[in-house]
Every structure is written in C-alpha cells, then in structure tokens.
Amino acid sequence: MKKDVEQIIDPGRRYGAWAGFPKGHARNVDNCAEQVYSNDREMRSYQCNRKKGHGYRGEFCKQHALKYPALGTPVVYAYRVSRWADGGITKQEIQGWTKEFVTLKNGTREKRQSQHDSWFETFDEAREFVLSRAIRAIKSAQKTIVTHEALIERWCDAEDVE
Ligand SMILES: [Zn+2]
C-alpha cells in the first residue's frame, strides 16, 4: 500500500467520484494534486485547477504547497502558546511529513493541524499567530483572577459575619 503522500500525488488518481459517478474524473497531471471542494451546498470534490510546480515533488500549486511542503523546506514554526505553556518561534526545516504529523529538522514530530502548533512561510505570520494566542491566554488568566477575587471576597464576608 502506498504511503498517504504518494496516494495524494498519484498520477492515476481520480477526483469527484460519487455513487452516481463512480469513476470520477482522471487527474490532470499538469495541475496541482490537491482535492478541493465546491462552496455550494453540494460540496462536490474536484482537483485543484492551479498549475503545479511547488511543494512535495513539485506536485502542488503555491497555495497548497504549504500543506504539502517539499522536504527540506525552510519554515517558521510557532508552537504551544496556551494558558499552560510558553510558546516559541523557531526556524526549522521540514524533514518529513504524513497526513497527521510533520517531522522537523530538530527531530521533533508535531501534529500537522493543531490549535497551538503551526508552521508559516514568514516570521510575520508566525508572530501574528503567537500574539493572538498569547492575548487569548492573558484574557483567560484575567478571567480566572476575577473569579478568584470574587470567591475570596465572599469568604472574607462570611468570616466577618461570625
Ligand atoms: Zn492547489
């Protein structure tokens, strides 16, 4: 069985198959291998119609290349910015990836799609991501402080009564 990456770029792949059209459309090998969906209610699937030439083995368009990066692609990796953990931004290189995980040059294996981890082409994009997560963490912490202050006040009031 082919690895998921190879299945995605398979030249014999077919797109848009469904019960009423089981064969689907043959892949146009000049175009990006990614499967995309129509925006209407039918959510039909079809092959991305942009020219290929980027990403893994050059089989993707520029936009989908970020989802399917070429091995050795330099990336800016932003990670784990949450209430419980510090985050950071590091310069990395994609060493390998599967549908679910990406392996970075420092040897770490990270989830490809996570609320707290993501990779970016530019430092600015990574900084935006980290900042938005950090602000969310601060707001959440402020809420916790307010809740606890109210609790402490209530306890103190109870003390006064006795
Ligand atoms: Zn594409």
Image (spheres, rainbow, N blue to C red):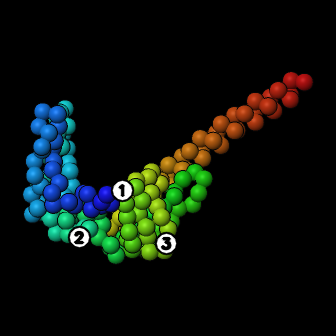
Give the CA distance from mark 3 to mark 2: 22 Å
Residue extending farthest to the front is 1
In this image, 36 relative to 83: left or right?
A: left
- The residue shown at (44%, 52%) is 114
Q: Amino acid at mark 2?
A: Arg
Q: Secondary structure at mark 1?
A: loop
Q: Earlier in the sequence, mark 1 or mark 2?
A: 2
Give coordinates of residue 31: x percent, y percent: 12, 60
Against 134, residue 107 (above or below) is below
Q: Earlier in the sequence, mark 1 or mark 3?
A: 1
Query: Is residue 116 in view?
Result: yes
Q: Which mark is residue 57?
A: 2
- The residue shown at (79%, 31%) is 155
Q: Earlier in the sequence, mark 3 or mark 2?
A: 2
- The residue shown at (15%, 43%) is 16
Which quarter of the image is occupied by the C terminus?
top right
- The residue shown at (23%, 70%) is 57
Against 161, residue 16 (above or below) is below
Give coordinates of residue 150: x percent, y percent: 69, 34
Q: Amino acid at mark 3?
A: Gly
In this image, 5 relative to 22: left or right?
A: right
Give coordinates of residue 75: x percent, y percent: 36, 70
According to the image, label 3 marks what residue?
Answer: 107
Q: Amino acid at mark 1?
A: Lys
Residue extending farthest to the top is 161
Q: Which mark is residue 108?
A: none
Give the CA distance from mark 1 to mark 2: 16 Å
Task: Give 117 or 125, whichever is nearer the viewer.
Answer: 117
Give coordinates of residue 13: x percent, y percent: 17, 54
Q: Secondary structure at mark 3?
A: loop
In this image, 54 relative to 130: left or right?
A: left
According to the image, label 1 marks what residue?
Answer: 99
